[in-house]
Image (tube, rainbow, N blue to C red):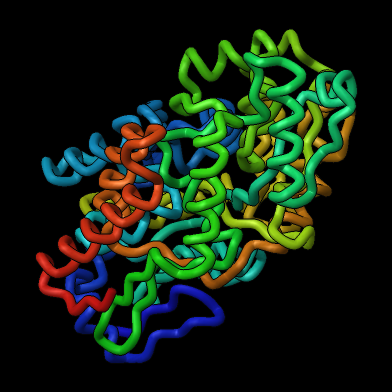
């Protein structure tokens, strides 16, 4: 089979050898949804904000399908392990949330069903092309894209104004602003480096033009030492060495506490982060604003930080109904409104026609009424299509994460961590019998 990772990088038929792990390109076979006139009952596992509200809205408006929702930990906090174990045990649910970076690994392990036969082309055609490409592997569709996750910079507008700090538009200006923050308050920093979250770092590399994974002919080419990655690695090493950013685990009590007491002025996140801050810091309503992510040349550019899809585990016998529910969540105005109106989600729909509905449903009072979706729109359009995720993301990120935590002045560096991720990836692909260069 051929592989379609991006519009600009098509892999020719020889990739079949490199993707031999995608055996049968299927899963549980054809859906055998209920035909006895009774509603089809689905089980759905996920963790994204507003999921309960969406399920309630769907159940209230549909009689032929009923959904039972179980909230599980976020993917890297145990959710993916729970899904994998359930698939192996044969008792997985009918639908699961999977972020774009982890989808290829689930596909390559044979854990999911291909859904192209039940995912309407009319729905797929209305989605952000980059999101469709990230869910199309081996020329087949493996998940329903829900949101895109362009990068954004959230900042305390009141503190920036108090200390007369300009909101940075470039990474050079970001460092200067970081120096001003530290000078204004010795305990304060402009933002936080998350040692437990390699995907934030990878989004930075993506924004800079990196391409870590590339499949050509029958070979995986791995490159984490390209100029873009090297530039990003050196930049963040410099910020850490100079003590210009905090180093705390993402969404940890330490991180949250620093936001609450004003010793962290900003957050380098994604579109979904608007809802996170709003839900975490309700007492700071009106004090925050959103700016485009700083770029290297001042022109719009973005990677994608996370972003969710809905996929059907291989042992579900209700594929058609599961995809119908997933499509409703992702591509209907009712589904998007139900999620965002909960007040906890700032999802940026992959379905481009639903952006106005999302904007209208999100109460932007926390951001002083700012039209944050207009900003997300520009950032989303600037997401590079060069990046692709490999089939061993878990291995790659575990190796990087283990070493990010040890980075310290005079000790291990970010470059060491990225190199460890590279080496672990090559070793894992080789172990699987695949041809690798890099």
Viewer-closest of 412 and 434: 412
Q: Is residue 293 left or right of residue 123?
A: right
Q: How many marks?
A: 0
Q: Check the picture and name the quadrant holding the C terminus.
A: bottom left
Image quadrant where residue 219 sits: bottom left
Q: Residue 101: percent from the left, percent from the top?
A: 41, 54
Identity of the residue drawn at 69% across and 59% down? 296
For residue 77, above or below residue 144: above
Q: Residue 39: percent from the left, percent from the top?
A: 41, 40
Q: Is residue 77 left or right of residue 166?
A: left
For residue 430, above or below residue 171: below
Q: Residue 382: percent from the left, percent from the top?
A: 70, 63
Image quadrant where residue 20 sits: bottom left
Identity of the residue drawn at 17% across and 39% down? 85
| Residue 390 visible (yes or no) | yes
Identity of the residue drawn at 75% across and 62% down? 297
Q: Is residue 341 left or right of residue 368?
A: left
Identity of the residue drawn at 36% across and 28% down? 72
Q: Residue 121: percent from the left, percent from the top?
A: 56, 71
Viewer-closest of 428 and 261: 261
Q: Residue furthest front?
A: 410
For residue 246, above or below residue 176: above
Q: Is residue 95 left or right of residue 324?
A: left
Viewer-closest of 85 and 270: 270
For residue 144, above or below residue 179: below
| Residue 115 visible (yes or no) | no
Q: Check the picture and name the quadrant holding the N terminus.
A: bottom left
């Amino acid at each position: 089979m051929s592989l379609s990772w991006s519009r600009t990088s098509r892999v020719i038929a020889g990739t079949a050898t490199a993707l031999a792990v995608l055996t049968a390109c299927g899963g549980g076979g054809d859906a055998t949804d209920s035909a006895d006139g009774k509603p089809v009952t689905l089980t759905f596992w996920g963790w994204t904000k507003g999921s309960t509200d969406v399920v309630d809205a769907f159940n209230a408006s549909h009689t032929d399908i009923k959904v039972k929702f179980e909230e599980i930990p976020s993917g890297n906090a145990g959710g993916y392990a729970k899904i994998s174990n359930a698939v192996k045990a044969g008792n997985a649910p009918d639908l699961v949330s999977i972020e774009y970076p982890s989808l290829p690994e689930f596909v390559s392990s044979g854990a999911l069903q291909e859904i192209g036969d039940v995912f309407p082309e009319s729905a797929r055609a209305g989605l952000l092309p980059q999101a469709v490409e990230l869910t199309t592997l081996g020329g087949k569709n493996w998940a329903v894209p829900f949101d895109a996750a362009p990068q954004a910079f959230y900042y305390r507008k009141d503190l920036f104004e108090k200390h007369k700090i300009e909101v940075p538009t470039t990474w050079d200006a970001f460092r200067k602003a970081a120096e001003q923050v530290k000078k204004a308050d010795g305990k304060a920093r402009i933002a936080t480096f998350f040692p437990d979250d390699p995907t934030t770092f990878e989004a930075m590399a993506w924004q800079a033009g990196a391409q870590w994974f590339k499949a050509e002919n029958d070979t995986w080419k791995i490159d984490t030492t390209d100029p873009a990655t090297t530039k990003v690695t050196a930049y963040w090493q410099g910020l850490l060495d100079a003590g210009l950013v905090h180093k705390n685990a993402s969404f940890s009590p330490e991180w949250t506490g620093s936001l609450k007491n004003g010793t962290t002025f900003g957050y380098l996140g994604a579109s979904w982060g608007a809802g996170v801050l709003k839900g975490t810091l309700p007492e700071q309503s009106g004090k925050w604003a959103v700016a485009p992510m700083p770029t290297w040349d001042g022109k719009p550019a973005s990677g994608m930080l996370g972003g969710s899809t809905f996929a059907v585990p291989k042992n579900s016998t209700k594929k058609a109904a599961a995809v119908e529910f997933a499509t409703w969540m992702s591509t209907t105005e009712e589904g998007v409104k139900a999620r965002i109106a909960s007040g906890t989600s700032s999802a940026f729909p992959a379905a481009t026609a639903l952006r106005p509905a999302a904007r209208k449903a999100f109460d932007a009072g926390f951001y002083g009424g700012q039209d944050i979706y207009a900003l997300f729109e520009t950032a989303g359009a600037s997401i590079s299509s060069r990046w692709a995720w490999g089939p061993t993301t878990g291995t790659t990120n575990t190796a990087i994460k283990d070493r990010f935590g040890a980075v310290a002045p005079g000790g291990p560096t970010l470059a060491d961590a990225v190199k460890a991720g590279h080496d672990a990836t090559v070793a894992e692909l080789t172990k699987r019998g695949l041809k690798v260069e890099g």
